[in-house]
Each structure stands twice: as structure tokens, then as C-alpha cells.
Image: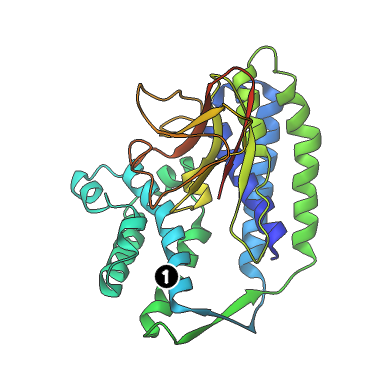
């Protein structure tokens, strides 16, 4: 699976999660509900196909630090799910720390924490995980990275990685998913622009795949209107541990970034971080933006009416 295909699949999952949670009112419309069901079926088949692909050694290598970072990204997604779904207060306390705080520490502590998150997912009900849009492939990848870390030692040692061979089936399924969007979802959602404009705008935000080149980090960007919250991403899908928040707006326009439990919420008074135009804020975690377990990262234009431009890497 190449990077472009992976970006498409990530977007499909984000749309399904949106329609299950904040965008659920849209699915009361029969044609949109039918489109969501069709997309969910295709996404399941895409996941099965990706898992069934042959694995070959390519000679591409990752040093130990890269593997640790990638494992932390997967684990952060699972940690947020576990904290949100478990009824065990003690477990929630044990998983309180975001991976950005654990990653710089000792290897033994990081590996123990990754293992604890992996085991926590195993304690959750399958139905609850399914309702939350859980992707088993995320846990499988974490387990593979954890096994590699356990089997190697030292910063300099290289870890051989495998990549999935491309199959003829996967492009066909991705094409079918694109057609489902174009014919069974997009026109019916956009038809609600007057009746439910905020939900349509949020749908458009998650509908746009992030453009990720293989040689650079993921970058999210988009417009935001004065006083109207814009969804940057669902932290459970993006897996971005330490975001860089930017403001590409014109002179005098300020943006406030914040986290929230829903995809369309406004920030509480004083919540979040203000980023002035043409500047960036580099964060090690999300603690300055709101509650640690709030799944959505949002941005709102605060100063001067008009349209702003945000970017997050």
C-alpha cells in the first residue's frame, strides 16, 4: 500500500467516525445512511485486503528511535480509545499520561506503557470498540512495532521492515469507495447546506484527505471563518503526538487552537492556545489545549472578521 492509498483509507475512517458521532444527525436522512453503510462495507473489505497482502523485505530500514516514534503514534490512538471506553477508573488513571510524555523517558518504561495500552484494548468489549470506529490494524501495527523494539537494543541498530506488495484488488476497492463518496454521500450531504450548515462544513473537513509525502510529516491545512470552529482532525485517527500549530492568515488575524469532546464545540473562556498570523507554536503534547482525553483538535478565528488559514503538522 502506497502513501496516497493510506491517506485515502485514513480519510474514509475519519468520515465514518464523524457520521457515527458528531455527524449522526445527517444519517437520519435515508440516502446518507445508505451511503454510510456502503462505505463502511468497502472499508472493511479494504482492511481485509490490506491484511492479506504478501509481505516482502525491501531493504528499507528504520533506526530504533523511528520505531519508537511510530509505535507511540499508534499507541496514542489506542490510549485515547481505552480511556474513553473503559469503566475501570483505575485503568483510566494508569493510562492518563499521553505518549508525548513517556516517549522521551527510559526504554523500559516506554515498552511497559506500550504493553499496558495494548492489553487495555484487549479488555474492552468488541461491540464498544466497533461503535467507536476501532481499527484492529492499528493494534496489530503497535504489536509488531513493540515486538521489534523488544528484539533489538541500542540507537544504532537497524531494524529491517517489510512492506505490503500491491494487489490488483486494493485499487478496485479504493475506486469503489471514491465512487460511493461521489454518488452516494457527497451530493446528499451537500444538499443539507442550508438546513445543517455546520455539519456540512465539518463533513467537508474530514472528507479532505491529508496530503502526506513519504519523505515528510503529515500536514493538515484549511480555512476557518470568524467565530466558527473548524475541525482540524480526530486525534484518534491522526495519531499526531506532538503537533506544530501554524497561522497562515493575513495580518491581524489570530487563531485559537483547542481540544474538545465534540467536533463542533467552541472553546471555553480562556481555553486553548492563541497563534498570531505568520507564526507557529510547537507543542510536545495537547495539555495546553484542553482536557487530555478530548479527541478532537479544533481551531477558531478570533480576531477580525473574515477568513483565516490554519496549518498543523
Could you tell whether 151 is left or right of 227 in the image?
left
Helix, strand or loop at mark 1:
helix
Q: Nearer the viewer, residue 246 or 161?
A: 246
Question: Which corner quadrant of the image does residue 84 belong to?
Answer: top left
From the top left corner, tell me how far across and down residue 21 is, in percent.
50, 31
The quadrant of the picture occupied by the N terminus is: bottom right
How is colour applied across the structure in the image?
Answer: rainbow
Position of residue 35 relative to residue 303, above or below, is below
Residue pushed farthest front? Answer: 251
The residue under the point 22% across, 53% down is 94
Position of residue 292 relative to residue 111, above or below, is above
Q: How many labels does the image show?
A: 1
Question: Which corner quadrant of the image does residue 251 belong to?
Answer: top right
The residue under the point 20% across, 44% down is 89
Residue pushed farthest left? Answer: 90
Could you tell whether 232 is left or right of 73 in the image?
right
From the top left corner, tell me how far across and down residue 177 is, in percent.
74, 46
The residue under the point 35% across, 35% down is 290
Could you tell whether 259 is left or right of 16 in the image?
left
From the top left corner, tell me how far across and down residue 108 is, in percent.
26, 74
The answer to whether residue 279 is visible is: yes
From the top left corner, tell me how far across and down residue 218 is, in percent.
60, 54
The answer to whether residue 22 is visible is: no
The residue indicated by pointer 1 is: 68
Binning the other alpha carbons within 10 Å of mark 1 as few (below 14), some (14 to 19) or many (20 upward) gives: many
Q: Nearer the viewer, residue 190 or 139?
A: 190
Q: Nearer the viewer, residue 190 or 154?
A: 154
The residue under the point 69% across, 12% down is 194
Q: Which of 37 and 306 is in front in this view?
A: 306
Amino acid at each position: 500500500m502506497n502513501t496516497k492509498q493510506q491517506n485515502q483509507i485514513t480519510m474514509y475512517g475519519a468520515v465514518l467516525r464523524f457520521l457515527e458521532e458528531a455527524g449522526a444527525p445527517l444519517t437520519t436522512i435515508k440516502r446518507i445512511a445508505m451511503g454510510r453503510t456502503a462505505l463502511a462495507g468497502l472499508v472493511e473489505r479494504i482492511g481485509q485486503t490490506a491484511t492479506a497482502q504478501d509481505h516482502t523485505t525491501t531493504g528499507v530500514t528504520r533506526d530504533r528511535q523511528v520505531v519508537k516514534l511510530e509505535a507511540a503514534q499508534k499507541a496514542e490512538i489506542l490510549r485515547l480509545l481505552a480511556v474513553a471506553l473503559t469503566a475501570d477508573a483505575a485503568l483510566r488513571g494508569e493510562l492518563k499520561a499521553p505518549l508525548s510524555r513517556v516517549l522521551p523517558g527510559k526504554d523500559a518504561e516506554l515498552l511497559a506503557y506500550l504493553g499496558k495500552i495494548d492489553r487495555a484494548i484487549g479488555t474492552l468489549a468488541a461491540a464498544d470498540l466497533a461503535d467507536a470506529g476501532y481499527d484492529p490494524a492499528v493494534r496489530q501495527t503497535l504489536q509488531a512495532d513493540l515486538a521489534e523494539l523488544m528484539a533489538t537494543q541500542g540507537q544504532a541498530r537497524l531494524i529491517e521492515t517489510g512492506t505490503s506488495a500491491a494487489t490488483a484488488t486494493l485499487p478496485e476497492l479504493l475506486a469503489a469507495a471514491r465512487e460511493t463518496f461521489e454518488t452516494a454521500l457527497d451530493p446528499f450531504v451537500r444538499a443539507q447546506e442550508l438546513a445543517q450548515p455546520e455539519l456540512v462544513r465539518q463533513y467537508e473537513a474530514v472528507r479532505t484527505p491529508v496530503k502526506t509525502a513519504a519523505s515528510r510529516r503529515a500536514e493538515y491545512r484549511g480555512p476557518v471563518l470568524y467565530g466558527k470552529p473548524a475541525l482540524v482532525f480526530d486525534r484518534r485517527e491522526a495519531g499526531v503526538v506532538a503537533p506544530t500549530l501554524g497561522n497562515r492568515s493575513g495580518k491581524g488575524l489570530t487563531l485559537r487552537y483547542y481540544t474538545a469532546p465534540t467536533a463542533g464545540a467552541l472553546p471555553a473562556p480562556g481555553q486553548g492556545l492563541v497563534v498570531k498570523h505568520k507564526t507557529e507554536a510547537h507543542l510536545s503534547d495537547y495539555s495546553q489545549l484542553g482536557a487530555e482525553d478530548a479527541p478532537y483538535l479544533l481551531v477558531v478565528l478570533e480576531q477580525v472578521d473574515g477568513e483565516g488559514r490554519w496549518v498543523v503538522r
